[in-house]
Image: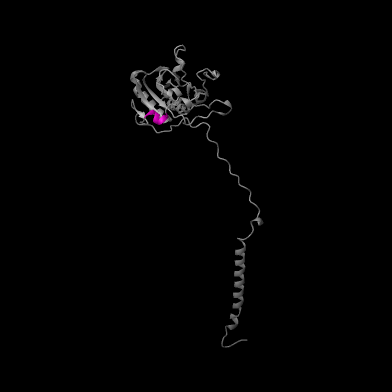
Amino acid sequence: MFDPLFPDATRRRPFPLLLVAGILLFLLLLILLVRIPNCRSDTYPALPEIKTTEPPPARLHPDLHTPVRPPLDQFPRDAKRPAKRETECADPINLDSFSAARDLVYVDDPRVWWESDHDEADRDIEDDHSMHAAMELPFRRLVNLAARQCPEFQLRVQECYRPAGIHSAKSLHCEGRALDLTFGRDNEPLPPAQRNDAYEKLAILCWQAGFDWVYYENSRGTGPHIHVSVRRDAPRLQPPPDGLPLPSMTSGHPNPGISVPVPQPDGTETASNRHE
């Protein structure tokens, strides 16, 4: 009924209806919010299983062209890197745990001059291609570094594995874990006046190649040379599968080097003792 004292009363009556509608809407939203987290997971289709791929296998042949250490500013005669005794860096000899047939590999590379290839057979029976498997990786890296950074010189292997003879009984040459190296030119040694600078470059390259101990030895008996050695547990270059040859080490040579077992001094496995 219209009340003249309150002319707007009739327009206020819809307010309770709006309030009730709002409450009902709020309750409906609240119910929806409560039910959604509690929905059973089986009401949704299962997601496909995501399969993770295994990481790629380790590289069979590591980088043999890049130095593993920065260059040194100098490497004078009689210097050692690290500046410690050889046995502190490259392990002392242990012939009880050494097996020539198991631990040695045969390495060849036409870019290298090998002294044993030029020895008279009736005077010297050494084979400078025979070296401990732990020596192969830094040696091959050195060959590549020398060919690229010092192409005017020829890397020369003067001494490697020698089970007996001119070295002391404690020499790592008896396990093939030491190398005596020089630089030459055209299959000839360098003149004495050129050796100091050239051998210093060679010593720095040996350090960059990753040998565990490098010594610029100035021996009166054998003359100046670079003596390098490695630990017996140093990383080894893994052989290719199925007896395949190692991949090319340089574009100039399709197959400049292989690795095959070295025979024991008693002559077993002599079929592997050959130049390829």
Q: Is residue 214 left or right of residue 60?
A: left
Does the image show residue 184?
A: yes
Residue 276 lies, with reference to residue 21, above or below; the image says above
Name the residue nearer the viewer: 157 or 134: 134
How many dots with numbers?
0
Q: Residue furthest bottom?
A: 4
Tell me which corner region of the image, top left, top right, bottom left or bottom right, holds residue 145: top left
Name the residue nearer the viewer: 119 or 182: 119
Q: Position of residue 8 (x, y in %)?
A: 57, 83
Q: Position of residue 106 (x, y in %)?
A: 50, 22
Taking the magenta stretch, the answer to whether it contains residue 90 is yes
Q: Quadrant of the N terminus?
A: bottom right
Q: Is residue 5 left or right of residue 204?
A: right
Name the residue nearer the viewer: 20 or 242: 242
Q: Which residues are magenta?
A: 85-91
Residue drawn 59% across and 75% down? 19
Does the image show residue 151?
A: no
Q: Residue furthest front?
A: 96
Tell me which corner region of the image, top left, top right, bottom left or bottom right, holds residue 199: top left
Residue drawn 42% across and 24% down? 172
Q: Main secondary structure of the magenta part?
A: helix
Q: Is residue 131 left or right of residue 200?
A: right
Q: Residue furthest top?
A: 122
Task: Indicate the colouring scheme.
Answer: one colour
Q: Position of residue 263 (x, y in %)?
A: 52, 20
Taking the magenta stretch, the answer to whether it contains residue 106 is no
Name the residue nearer the viewer: 130 or 193: 130
Residue 106 lies, with reference to residue 122, above or below; the image says below
Q: Position of residue 247 (x, y in %)?
A: 53, 27
